[in-house]
Structures are given as structure tokens and as C-alpha cells.
Amino acid sequence: MMFRSRAAQTTILATGSALAFMAAAVGDHAQAQGNLDASYTISFARIPVGEITATVVFGDSEYAISARARAGGVMKILSVDGEGSFTTTTRGTIKDGHPVPTNFTSKIVSNTGNSDVTMVLDEGSVRELAATPPPSQDRVPVTAANRRGIVDPLTALLFSAAASGETLSKDACRRTLPIFDGHQRYDLKLAFKRMDKVTAEKGYAGPVAVCSISYEPIAGHRASTPLVKYLSEGREMEMAFAPITGTRLLAPFRLSVVSMLANVMIDANRFETTAHPLDASPIAGPKAR
């Protein structure tokens, strides 16, 4: 079956996580504290094939994000031979209203092999990196320049909402995300598509901003991989963002990808948000370095 190479597997899981497993948005002058607890259903041709749980926690000066995903069954048509799981976390600080990552980890486990990444970042540059397996000779080399001016896959989607006016606007979609996941460097280019309405089984019901997404591989990938070619040829991908109640923050509610065989959908069935007073301390555990 196609798309079973490690490059394809990493792309569909790691990039898929960056696209939709979870993320949030901090406004340019946002000072709110709060959290998002969400769960998503992964479906292929309208058949449930996996699930995702995500937690986003914001403090006044730091943030933490974690997500877990598992896919199996017919998902092996896309990437995973049998069962596959993905766990990722990121921590960082909020400077001048913008999220700045300091630590990122990810782990992919499947029947075809494992992938582990631990990164320490400093002002958008990779300071320390431990990634297994090591890159093979047939990948586009990752240069030192490819590790500068980047964000990790989770922080990449911490969008800036406007400091005033409506939280949901066309401007939320107008950006290019320079992502490095420890193995691959790629850009996700977003553009406004439309406004829509959604309803979760538990939590949010209301308007969303829908962005189109294009994927541009830069380094760390196999240029000949069918999935890389497929995603970079202008395939139809879109993501809907919903507001976090009581803040000027946004988070992904739904992702859809038009596949060669059938549509892949990642849709929130639970999307619950909580705002905290400014003197609260919602982030527990060790502080980001």
C-alpha cells in the first residue's frame, strides 16, 4: 500500500498534528489566562478511525500545550501500518503578547517504527536537538539556516487575533507558518476562505473562521515521497478556528483534507474553554526554560 515509508508516516502524523491536533491564538495585546480542553474524532470516508485529546493552558507570561492522538484501522491506507500513536508537548513564554517556544517534544509510535524528538529553542532558533531515527541520505538536507526563524508545530498555530474589533476576522488566516518539527522544515501558507458555523457535542457552538492551507516542503523530506508530492501540489485543505470564550484567543475546531480516495476529517466533539483571573496560576508543573 502507498505512503508507508517513514517520511510519509512522519508527514501525515506530525504535519497533521501541527495542522489540527490542537493549537490556540494569543492576541497582540492579550493578557487573559485560561485553558482549552478538547477532543477530536478522526474520520476517513466518514468512518471513525482515530481520536485526539488536547489541552492548552495559558498564564500571564507562559503557556503549555499537550496533545495525544491514536489512529488505526483504515488509516493504514494513508500512513500507518496497523496502529499508530502520537504524543507531543510544547512549553514557552508569552512576550509582548506573542508565544515564544522554549521546549518541544514529540513521539510517534507505529508498527513500522518509532520517531522521537526533543528540542530546546531560543528566540526562534534551535539551540539543542535530539531526534531519532537519524536522517537518511535520500532526504533533502536540513541546514543550520533551516533551524533559524522557526516555530515548533504546536506553537506555529498560536495565532494573533486583532487587539480590537472582532476576534474572528479574515486577518486571522493571512499568514505563513515556518515550521520545524525536529525532522522536517516546511511552510504552511494560510489564506481566508469563508466564515461558517459549528456545534460541538459538548462545549462550543457558534461562528468559525475557515482558512485554506497549502503545504510547502523545504528540507528534511524525501522529495520522491508520494505523500509529499501529493500535499505540495495544491490539494484542498482547510481548517476552521473557533474563539476561546472570555479571551481574544482562537483554536482549531475542524480540519478537512481531500484525499485521493476519500476525505479525511478531524472534527471537535468536545471544545470546552475556561478563562481565569489575571492573578490565577493555571500552569502547573515545572516552568519552561
Image (cartoon, rainbow, N blue to C red):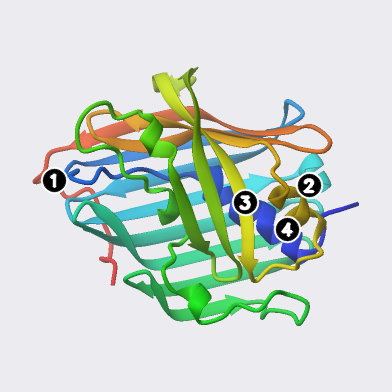
How many numbered markers are drawn?
Answer: 4
Position of 82 compared to 17: left or right? right
Q: Nearer the viewer, residue 166 or 75?
A: 166
Sequence-wise, the earlier of marks 4 and 3 is: 4
Q: Quadrant of residue 236?
A: top right
> Which tag is nearer the camera, tag 4 or tag 1?
4
Q: Amino acid at mark 3?
A: Tyr
Image disc number at residue 24: none
Q: Secondary structure at mark 1?
A: loop
**What residue did someone put label 1 on?**
280
Position of 256 compared to 281: left or right? right
Q: Secondary structure at mark 4?
A: helix
**What residue did someone put label 2 on?**
78
State how far apart marks 2 and 3 are (Cα).
Answer: 17 Å
**What residue did someone put label 4 on?**
9
Q: Nearer the viewer, residue 196 or 47?
A: 196
How many residues crowd around disc 4 within 10 Å: few (fewer than 14), some, or many (20 or more)? many
**What residue did someone put label 3 on?**
215
Q: Amino acid at mark 4?
A: Gln
State how far apart marks 1 and 3 are (Cα).
Answer: 38 Å
